[in-house]
């Protein structure tokens, strides 16, 4: 039986099922940072399982502390690209990418997570009717990300999270400094 703690091994759907107390619809938070949003939404929605993915070890440790008492939350330490390769298709009902590094300089735009291949991976990972949620402080990144989803046949809809939903750590910072936040949801 796998432990709920962070793992660097390649997870399969079977492993992931073992990370949680019981099977339930799965939401994945890519680049979950310190786990503020992951832990709070897992508390708010105990009927779902929540999986964080984060590549920085110190943030994984912070997340582990936050989710320690939550049977419906787990974290994987690793790179999103590797996780995509190893997760079974249609494993997820919802995928969040919130305040992903915007790489504002034009010459760095290729480092952004949302690229054509990323969108294909999201398409493989989501169940039919599943939803991808995106938020960013960068207008340029949000518009480009939306464009890549649209070019590959996804439907884009506005996304305004309910008031009771937690704010991510970066979102709290941007809201406190008056930065406009761009959001959308994508489905096929
Ligand atoms: C700007 S922070 C946002 C964190 C959190 N989502 C929030 O809104 O507070 C982006 C996070 O994504 C993580 N990250 C970036 N690229 C990643 C990748 N390829 N795989 C896993 N994590 C990644 C970073 O380490 C960082 O913790």
Image (cartoon, helix red, strand yellow):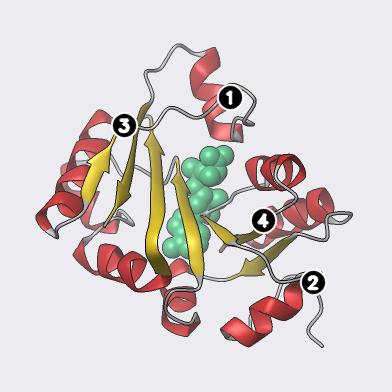
Real-space Cα separation, disc 1 to disc 2, in angstroms: 28 Å
* Residue 11 visible in this rendered orientation of the protein: no
Q: Which residue is mark 4?
A: 48
Considering depth in this image, is 165 or 127 the residue closer to the camera?
127
* Between discs 3 and 2, the one toward the N terminus: 2
Q: CA distance from mark 4 to mark 2?
A: 16 Å
Residue 97 in sight from this viewpoint: yes
Is the distance from the Cβ of mark 2 to the nearest ligand 1 atom less than 8 Å?
no
Q: Element at badge 3?
A: loop
Please tell me which of labels 1 and 2 falls first in the chain.
2
Q: Mark 1 vs mark 2: give the one in front.
A: 2
Residue assigned mark 2:
4
Residue 6 placement, left or right of 130 = right
Q: What is the spatial separation of the Cα atoms under label 3 and label 4, in whole angstroms?
A: 23 Å
Which is more N-terminal, label 4 or label 3? 4
Q: Secondary structure at mark 4?
A: loop
* Front tag of 3 and 1: 3
- Circle nearer the viewer, 3 or 2: 3
Ligand 1 neighbours mark 4 (CB distance < 8 Å):
no
Residue linked to disc 3: 158
Q: Nearer the viewer, mark 4 or mark 1?
A: 4
Q: Which mark is residue 25?
A: none
Image quarter for residue 165?
A: top right
Query: Which x, y percent locates residue 173?
Result: 56, 23
Label placed on residue 172: 1
**Vertical order, 183 against 14 (above or below):** above
Question: Is residue 13 shown above or below 68?
Answer: below
Q: Earlier in the sequence, mark 4 or mark 1?
A: 4
């Amino acid at each position: 039986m796998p432990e709920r703690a962070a793992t660097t091994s390649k997870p399969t759907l079977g492993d992931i099922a073992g990370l949680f107390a019981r099977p339930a619809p799965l939401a994945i938070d890519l680049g979950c940072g310190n786990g503020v949003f992951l832990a709070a939404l897992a508390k708010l929605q105990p009927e779902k399982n929540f999986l964080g993915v984060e590549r920085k070890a110190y943030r994984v440790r912070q997340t582990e502390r936050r989710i320690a008492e939550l049977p419906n939350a787990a974290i994987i330490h690793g790179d999103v690209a590797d996780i995509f390769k190893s997760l079974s298709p249609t494993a997820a009902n919802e995928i969040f990418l919130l305040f992903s590094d915007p790489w504002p300089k034009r010459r760095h735009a290729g480092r952004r997570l949302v690229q054509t291949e990323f969108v294909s991976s999201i398409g493989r990972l989501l169940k039919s009717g599943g939803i991808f949620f995106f938020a960013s402080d960068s207008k340029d990144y949000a518009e480009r990300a939306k464009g890549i989803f649209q070019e590959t046949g996804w439907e884009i809809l506005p996304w305004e999270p309910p008031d009771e939903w937690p704010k991510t750590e970066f979102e709290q910072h941007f809201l406190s400094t008056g930065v406009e936040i761009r959001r959308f949801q994508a489905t096929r």
